[in-house]
């Protein structure tokens, strides 16, 4: 039976409405002072890399790819902020964690597929150090610049602190077995051995432990992790974008992000092979500067708006996910590929990671933050960065 003419003329198709909403959202995202950096994004998508290229040219492409990630990270940050306004700081923070770690996941997975085991584990440790020291340090200084202290959610930050400490222990124990093994096991291998099987078992257990935290927060202790209405920060007034259009644009931007990240790792691999670049400096300091840009935008903007719960979720909780989910997931996904990543971190990286975790624990233990504590995080980050540059090997 044919539809009435009135229905055809006055009821637009859902697909057309959604298309217009996505185009409008895309136009708003592009129209900003970051638009010029989209030229690097376009160039990075069509990058053609070759091992016979001069080192200077490879470094240039690496920088182009890194800069190309910045406007995409900004777009993700804008859309995540919109989701946080619609869904609340807690759920919005979890979304920002998942999408903020997309770059680290793609970079690490590509490095794993190439057999760069050392770069995988060091880059994850570096992302945690950058999130917890550099990004959280700047956010704390910004948020507390006009007041003595900032109060943070007691239960959310307490759980994040516990998870961060637990994740470090889960990595420290396998690392001790690596260092104590007489065979001198490395960060990974192309053949299945006893430590590969041990890493797989521990990875599955750690992921289950991480997923149980969501069951705890949304089920058993749900009321503990919800702010009272009088404590909630109201979102800024303005036209609301359709939720479906935000999700579609997030998928599109994420797909482009994956392509550029692949070229970023390829150029880095050629640089490491050709110039014998210090992998510790690259993994702990250089790579995370590009990969953590999204978290930095979300966290600093949230702190400036007095939304430290969202800032903490974008930094500390993001770091927890890297250690309790991303790294174990890489161990599991590497097995079918014949790339057996060992669930451990080299001694120097582990010590820097431990110092980072203790510093974060110390400043959030009383559930209050000050700009002076933020300066402590930035100072520690500078000390670690200088050490990896001058003394790393």
Image (cartoon, rainbow, N blue to C red):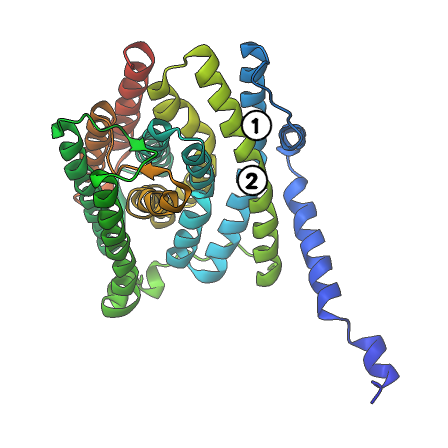
Residue 40 rendering spot, x and y as whole percentages: 63, 28
Image quarter for residue 53? top right
Image quarter for residue 378? top left
Q: Quadrant of the N terminus?
A: bottom right
In the rendered image, the residue lying farthest to the right is 5
- For label 2, the residue is 257
Q: Answer with left or right where residue 212 lies relative to residue 334.
A: left
Mark yes or no: residue 239 visible: no
Image quarter for residue 362? top left
Q: Look at the picture and state if 238 lies above or below 175.
A: below
User: Do the residues bearing badges 1 and 2 touch, measured as CB atoms within 8 Å?
Assistant: no
| Numbered label attached to residue 65 | 1
* SS type, badge 2: helix
Mark yes or no: residue 11 visible: yes
Residue 297 rendering spot, x and y as whole percentages: 47, 38
Q: Point out the tag, 1 or 2, that comes first from the N-terminus.
A: 1
In the rendered image, the residue lying farthest to the bottom is 1
């Amino acid at each position: 039976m044919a539809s009435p003419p009135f229905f055809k003329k006055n009821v637009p198709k859902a697909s057309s409405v959604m298309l217009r909403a996505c185009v409008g959202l895309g136009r708003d995202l592009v129209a900003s002072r970051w638009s010029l950096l989209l030229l690097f994004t376009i160039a990075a998508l069509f990058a053609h890399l070759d091992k016979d290229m001069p080192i200077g040219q490879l470094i240039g492409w690496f920088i182009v790819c890194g800069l190309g990630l910045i406007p995409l990270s900004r777009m993700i940050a804008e859309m995540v902020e919109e989701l946080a306004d619609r869904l609340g700081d807690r759920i919005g923070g979890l979304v920002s964690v998942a999408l903020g770690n997309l770059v680290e996941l793609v970079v690490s997975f590509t490095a794993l597929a190439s057999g760069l085991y050392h770069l995988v584990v060091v880059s994850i440790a570096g992302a945690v150090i950058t999130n917890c020291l550099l990004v959280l340090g700047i956010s704390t200084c910004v948020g507390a610049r006009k007041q003595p202290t900032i109060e943070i959610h007691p239960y959310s930050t307490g759980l994040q602190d516990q998870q961060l400490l637990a994740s470090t222990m889960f990595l420290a124990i396998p690392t001790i077995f690596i260092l104590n093994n007489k065979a001198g096991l490395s960060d990974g291998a192309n053949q299945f051995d006893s430590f590969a099987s041990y890493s797989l078992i521990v990875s599955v257990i750690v992921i289950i432990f991480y997923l149980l935290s969501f069951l705890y927060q949304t089920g058993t202790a749900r009321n503990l992790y919800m702010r009272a209405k009088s404590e909630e920060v109201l979102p800024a007034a303005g036209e609301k974008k359709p939720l479906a259009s935000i999700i579609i644009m997030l998928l599109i931007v994420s797909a482009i992000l994956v392509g550029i990240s692949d070229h970023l790792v390829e150029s880095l691999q050629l640089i490491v092979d050709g110039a014998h670049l210090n992998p510790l400096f690259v993994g702990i300091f250089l790579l995370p500067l590009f990969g953590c840009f999204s978290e930095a935008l979300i966290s600093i903007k949230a702190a400036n708006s007095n939304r430290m719960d969202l800032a903490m979720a974008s930094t500390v909780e993001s770091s927890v996910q890297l250690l309790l989910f991303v790294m174990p997931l890489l161990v599991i996904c590497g097995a079918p590929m014949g790339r057996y990543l060992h669930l451990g971190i080299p001694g120097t990286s582990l010590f820097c990671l431990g110092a980072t975790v203790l510093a974060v624990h110390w400043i959030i233990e009383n559930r209050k933050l000050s700009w002076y504590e933020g300066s402590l995080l930035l100072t520690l980050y500078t000390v670690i960065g200088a050490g990896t540059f001058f003394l790393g090997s």
